[in-house]
Image: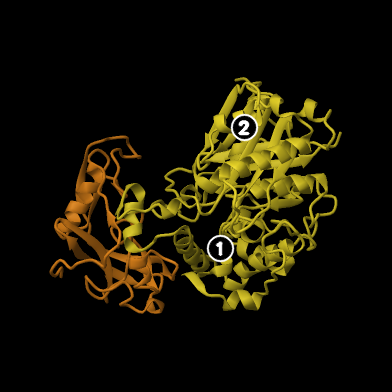
């Protein structure tokens, strides 16, 4: 499902992966797996990544693989003024997806048909809260892929 | 356990001042800050050398030493800054009140000076191609601006509670009507109808142009001192009855999507402390200045501060219940943002809301709520926030 790494539209923003916890999340995305931290002591999942479990205060954690299935929690359609690389693709959708594995885990992303689609590929007004989606990974450079979402029927 | 020492009514706002508000002002942020503070001190009847405390936003570009040596202030014995952009405003004033109430200073000045051209004025615009920290979970996907972040919460709120665009439009239209009565407001001469609101261009669906605050240059300042001193000054003191700040549990600034209940905003936690320390409740509030960087923050704040139940904030504004000349407190309404607020007077990260709260308590607003003696002022919903309860002095 993840094709050749495409050149992202010039000027699009990429994650800095600026600490070890964030870097691990992005490394798993590059490997085509959606994983979040799971506390080694109490088993709670957490995202965005951080060093300490807020439930039991344990530092030790694993990276638990999620099913990659979720539902649309909310969505917007962004219109200019925007950074140039995004304005060129506007209007486009941005969604928040709730993981089907744990309703406390949510991700921000975009609905696409295939990884590598422009952000305006899908008609945003066909998106609805509750839509079932699944993760797809879009390689954007060596060692970095962004999770995006496509509709699923089951 | 000892009872806590409450700041209730122990300090007062005794002076307010502001520059003109405009899209572009040709003077520096430092100069604007100095002008606003001078105006506030003149309004208070207090000499600059008496000021020994300074309070501001971390967004501020002019530090305390620059303010003090320009104005010829005396020795400063207390100074502080509050973070989180538009969440800071009431905290800036409330922390100054705490400092005065505990004797750390006698006369404190709090201010906000902003130029939209300055990088600090639009922290979200300072983006690099690599996005650090919490922004890396949202901005690469095109959720770039504060309006996008709040639009995401708004869509879900509308879905959960059946809120409508005309209900959000009622907020924009009402505060615009207030601005039309306020010669200092940037939108003084521009009317807004619900039809114009509904026809406006999108910015981030479901939010349109008129759901957004203004972009403004300008500065405003207030002077805080002890209530005893305040009663000896020429003007009527406006008592700081209550003050609270809050970072709710598991909160993420602006993009609060990663918790159990993203729509349970910071105002709920802030209101809890505010009302616990107050001698009156939401039903006794005559007028409110609610932080309105975006129109949906008004219904969310109405809910958070207890004027209606969760999900009822959008319909609360129907029937002109937010208007200065609407049904008012007795009629089940609450006049809000009587100067035009951030959406139609000026956007100074909420500081002009505090100035208008003082005017209402002095009886000098251009859209005065008759007989108003209590006013709630709030700061940014969606970020670590703060709130003030003001009341007129009944002595």
- The answer for which chain carries disc 2 is B
- The answer for which chain carries disc 1 is B
Q: Which of B226 and B154 is in front in this view?
A: B226
Q: Residue B252 location, x and y as percent?
A: 42, 48
Could you give the CA–CA distance between mark 2 and mark 1, rounded to whole angstroms? 35 Å
Relative placement, left or right, of B184 versus A116 is right
For the C terminus of chain B, the quadrant is top right
Which residue is at 55% across, 48% downward?
B86
Identify residue for label 2.
Answer: B70
Chain in orange on the image = A
Residue neighbourhood size for the residue with mark 2, other residues' Cα within 10 Å, grouped as few (<14), some (14–19), many (≥20): few
Q: Residue B213 location, x and y as percent?
A: 58, 60
Using the rendered view, name the quadrant where residue B143 is placed. bottom left
Q: Which residue lies furthest to the front in this view?
A: B26
Using the rendered view, name the quadrant where residue A133 is placed. bottom left
Which residue is at 25% across, 74% downward?
A117
The hue in which chain B appears in the rendered picture of the protein: yellow
Q: How many numbered dots are placed on residues in this image?
A: 2
Identify residue for label 1.
Answer: B212
Comparing labels 2 and 1, the label whose residue is closer to the camera: 2
Using the image, tell me which numbered label, if any, was put on residue B238: none
Q: Residue B242 location, x and y as percent?
A: 68, 37
Q: Tell me whether the residue at label 2 lies in contact with that at label 1, contact meaning CB atoms closer than 8 angstroms.
A: no
Q: Is residue B35 visible?
A: yes
Relative placement, left or right, of B18 versus B256 is right
């Amino acid at each position: 499902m993840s094709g050749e790494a495409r050149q992202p539209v010039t000027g699009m923003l990429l994650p800095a992966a600026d600490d070890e916890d964030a870097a691990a999340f992005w490394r798993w995305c590059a490997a085509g797996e959606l994983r979040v931290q799971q506390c080694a002591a109490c088993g709670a999942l957490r995202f965005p990544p951080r060093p300490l479990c807020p439930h039991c205060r344990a530092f030790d954690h694993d990276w638990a693989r999620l099913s990659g299935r979720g539902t649309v929690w909310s969505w917007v359609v962004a219109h200019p003024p925007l950074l140039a690389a995004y304005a060129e693709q506007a209007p486009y959708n941005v969604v928040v997806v709730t993981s089907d594995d744990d309703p406390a885990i949510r991700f921000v992303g975009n609905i696409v048909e295939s990884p590598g689609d422009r952000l305006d590929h899908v008609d945003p007004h066909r998106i609805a809260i509750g839509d079932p989606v699944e993760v797809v990974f879009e390689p954007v450079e060596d060692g970095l892929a962004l999770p995006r979402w496509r509709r699923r029927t089951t | 356990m000892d009872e806590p020492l409450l700041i209730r009514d122990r300090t007062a706002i005794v002076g307010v001042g502001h520059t003109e508000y405009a899209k572009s002002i040709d003077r520096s942020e430092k100069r604007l800050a100095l002008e606003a503070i001078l105006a506030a001190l003149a309004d208070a009847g207090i000499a600059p050398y008496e000021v020994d405390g300074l309070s501001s936003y971390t967004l501020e570009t002019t530090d305390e030493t620059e303010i003090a040596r320009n104005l010829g202030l005396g020795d400063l014995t207390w100074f502080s800054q509050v973070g989180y952009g538009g969440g800071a405003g009431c905290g800036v004033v409330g922390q100054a009140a705490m400092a005065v109430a505990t004797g750390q200073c006698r006369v404190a000045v709090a201010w906000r000076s902003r130029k939209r051209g300055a990088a600090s004025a639009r922290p979200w615009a300072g983006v690099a191609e690599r996005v650090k920290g919490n922004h890396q979970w949202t901005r690469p996907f095109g959720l770039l601006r504060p309006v996008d972040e709040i639009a995401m919460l708004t869509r879900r709120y509308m879905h959960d509670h059946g809120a409508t665009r005309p209900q959000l439009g009622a907020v924009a239209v009402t505060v615009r009507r207030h601005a039309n009565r306020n010669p200092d407001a940037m939108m003084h001469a521009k009317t807004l109808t619900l039809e114009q609101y509904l026809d406006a261009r999108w910015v981030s669906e479901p939010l349109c142009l008129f759901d957004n605050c203004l972009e403004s240059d300008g500065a405003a300042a207030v002077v805080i001192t002890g209530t005893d001193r305040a009663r000896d000054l020429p003007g009527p003191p406006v008592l700081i009855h209550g003050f609270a700040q809050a970072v709710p549990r598991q909160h993420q600034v602006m993009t609060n999507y990663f918790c159990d209940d993203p729509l349970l905003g910071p105002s709920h936690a802030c209101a809890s402390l505010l009302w616990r320390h107050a001698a009156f409740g939401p039903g006794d509030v005559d007028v409110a200045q609610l932080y309105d960087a975006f129109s949906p923050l008004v219904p969310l704040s109405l809910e958070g501060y207890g004027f209606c139940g969760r999900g009822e904030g959008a319909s609360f504004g129907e029937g002109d219940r937010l208007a200065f000349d609407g049904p008012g407190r007795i009629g089940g309404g609450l006049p809000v943002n009587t100067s035009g607020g951030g959406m139609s007077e000026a956007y100074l990260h909420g500081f002009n809301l505090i100035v208008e709260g003082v005017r209402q308590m002095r009886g000098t607003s251009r859209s005065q709520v008759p007989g108003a003696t209590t006013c709630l002022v709030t700061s940014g919903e969606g970020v670590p926030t703060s709130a003030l309860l003001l009341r007129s002095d009944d002595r």
